[in-house]
Image: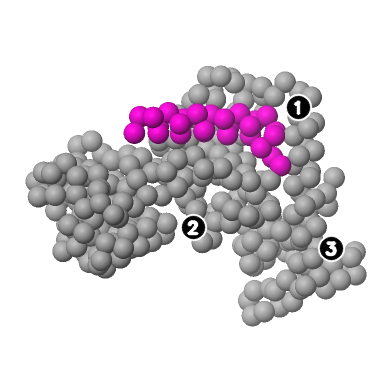
Amino acid sequence: MIDPRLQTLRVLRERGTVTAAAEALHLTPSTVSQQLRGLARDLDLVLLEAQGRRVRLTPAARTLLDHADRLHALWERAEADLAAHRDGTSGEVRIAAVSSALAALVAPAAARLRAEHPRLTVRLVEKESDDAAPLLLAHTVDITVIIPTERSPAPDDARFAQWPLLDEPQDLLVPVAHPLAAGGTARLADAAREPWIGSPDRSDQHRLMLTACAAAGYAPHIAHEANEWFAVSALVAQGFGIGLVPRLAPLPPEDEVVRVPLRGEVIPSRRIIACVRRGSHRQPPVAHGLTALRDTAANRHEQG
């Protein structure tokens, strides 16, 4: 077995503070500090240095973490090989996803898993993309379904394995009586003079909107802010502005809004990916979960 204190150090690297690491690991800060002091004492090394309210990893700690990452990947593969000796039809898979992917991809995939593997327990949780790495490293979840951001794992991060599931276009959301609703499609540049509904707390979506509008030649005038899709839809329906919404995002059917597909040179889209701890994809529950997600995403792609 791998020393659990190495996992504590890995989570501390990801979260930056002892308090945040303790929260991710469901431990007290004093327990985390005690574990790290004990690890440093056993190795006869200085692993952490105080830096204001945070701690800084020493070069020795970073070297240790390089080995720890490889050890954990090997252990994940070892668990997968051992699990292959069982039938793989029972166990648990925990999936975290951003809200639109949870509704349109993960929930249908989980329903399929429940039907095909009734002894397999599936647990679902809505989380933002930036939470992916800490959740996986803390073993809180097994699969994350996210939109890549600058804070999510890089494609070459040795601690994780990642697979694209779906490229999801964005639609312009306008009131039913809006002139842009009449043409069936629109160019993003056509909305340059419109008031917009921004979503600053939904960081991946907000950055995508700003980047797309900039590519279309303007900075959007953000008149109001809302983060949940039902709130964005309600503001648009009442004429407070227009919005940009992912095609998978569910909207209240009673709202008098129209999704307008975009055409032209600027058609914003976001990639939805699945991410797991490296080596864990061979564990039967995780493998079943990934298969269900891929199949559900393929069906959505075929449906347009």
Q: Which mark is residue 130?
A: none
**Is 190 on the left-hand or right-hand side of 11?**
left
The answer to whether 78 appears left or right of 260 in the picture is: right
Residue at the spot 37% in from the left edge and 49% down from the top edge? 269
Q: Label 3 sits on what residue type?
A: Leu
Q: Which residue: 38% across, 55% down?
A: 205
**At which x and y percent is residue 30?**
73, 64
- Nearest the eye: 299 or 13: 299
Residue at image mark 3: 39
Front residue of this view, candidates 301 and 121: 301
Q: Amino acid at mark 1?
A: Ala
Q: Secondary structure at mark 3?
A: helix
Which residue is tagged 1? 84
Q: Is residue 17 visible?
A: yes
User: Which image quarter is the C terminus in?
Assistant: top left
Where does the N terminus fall, quadrant-wise?
A: top right
Task: Classify mark 2: helix, strand or loop.
Answer: loop
- CA–CA distance in space, label 2 to label 1: 34 Å
* Residue with the mark numbered 2: 149
Amino acid at pointer 2: Thr
Magenta span? 279-304
Q: Is residue 110 left or right of residue 188?
A: right
